[in-house]
Image (tube, rainbow, N blue to C red):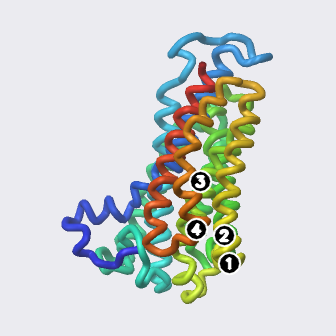
Amino acid sequence: MSTAPAAVPGPLSRWVAGARPRTLPAAAVPVVVGTAVGWWMRSGAPGGGRLVAGPDAVIWWRAGMALVVALALQVGTNYANDYSDGVRGTDRGRVGPLRLVASGSATPESVRRAALACFGVAGAAGLALAASTTWWLVPVGAACVVAGWLYTGGPRPYGYLGLGEAFVFLFFGVVATVGSAYVQRQAFGLWWVCVPVGLLSTALLEANNLRDVAGDAAAGKRTLAVRVGPRRARWLYVGSLAGVVAGIAGAAAVRPWALVALGALPLGLRPSRAVLDGASGRELLAVLARTGQLQLAVGALLALGIVL
């Protein structure tokens, strides 16, 4: 990841770049897909009865609050990672988005405060959702904040132990998707749609870790890509995308139009080919961008297929 502050001209642009906006689809897609599932449950899911029809089947303010929670958690986690990696010195000489602490663009304390502020925003929106649904959302939200901070923070960050992909699947797949559906209907249904959503986020992280594998190994950051080696990490990326196909097929068993999401999968061919052909370092920046585009396209089409 780039360490040149001059690449980002102004203070505001610096903070926007440090928030890593290209990672935001990982936060938005689960909310969109989960809200589509909530619409289905409220407008006539089998066994649930028809409650509301049409656009009113979505409780829009809850969907909006769920999106605020997800985006604030994502940005807060990005700032927290920037802070923790920066003070540990593991971000020096990286390829990719600006790192605020490592580049000297912001002080560690200011980045830490920014992370806590984002977590505070997520907490406030989450409390509003909990007050209108169930207070069990509070410990779930607290677990999300703790997971965001401990990814690279704390005495034994799990991102340094090769557990990042598992936690990303859990929180950006299962928790975010199922939670966004739950706040609509206060029930669980079509929960396995979280599988393709989570695997897309896993593939995104795997591409990121594959890009940084040499620097992480030198810095003692034992990501999954470092632990299994670049060759196996490349197959983990492709395997995650293959799992997306199976996940979409599973959703289609209940909502057949979910198969329209398969129309986005050709977007995964170029990044998969690049990864298997041995792309490394800066060459993987294009893979990351295309994986994000695939994530958005699959999420949008999957949500459309659920509501059709």
Dot 4: what SS? Answer: loop
Label whose residue precedes the other's in the sequence (1 or 4): 1
Look at label 2 and name its amino acid. Answer: Ala
Residue on which the image places disc 3: 201
Label 3 near label 4: C-beta < 8 Å?
A: no
Discs 3/1, front:
1
Residue 186 visible from this viewpoint: yes
The image shows residue 214 at horizontal and vertical percentages of 55, 83
Q: Quadrant of residue 75?
A: bottom left
The reply to whether residue 109 is visible in this rendering is: no
Is 142 or 211 nearer to us in this picture?
A: 211
Please give the name of the residue rendered at 42% of the width and 55% of the height, measured from the top-left corner: 22
At label 3, the amino acid type is: Ser
Q: Nearer the viewer, residue 234 or 140?
A: 234
Q: Name the residue under label 4.
A: 277
Q: For mark 2, what is the residue?
A: 233
Q: Is mark 2 on a helix, strand or loop?
A: helix
Q: Is mark 3 on a helix, strand or loop?
A: helix
For numbered disc 1, what is the local secondary structure? loop
The first of marks 3 and 2 along the sequence is 3
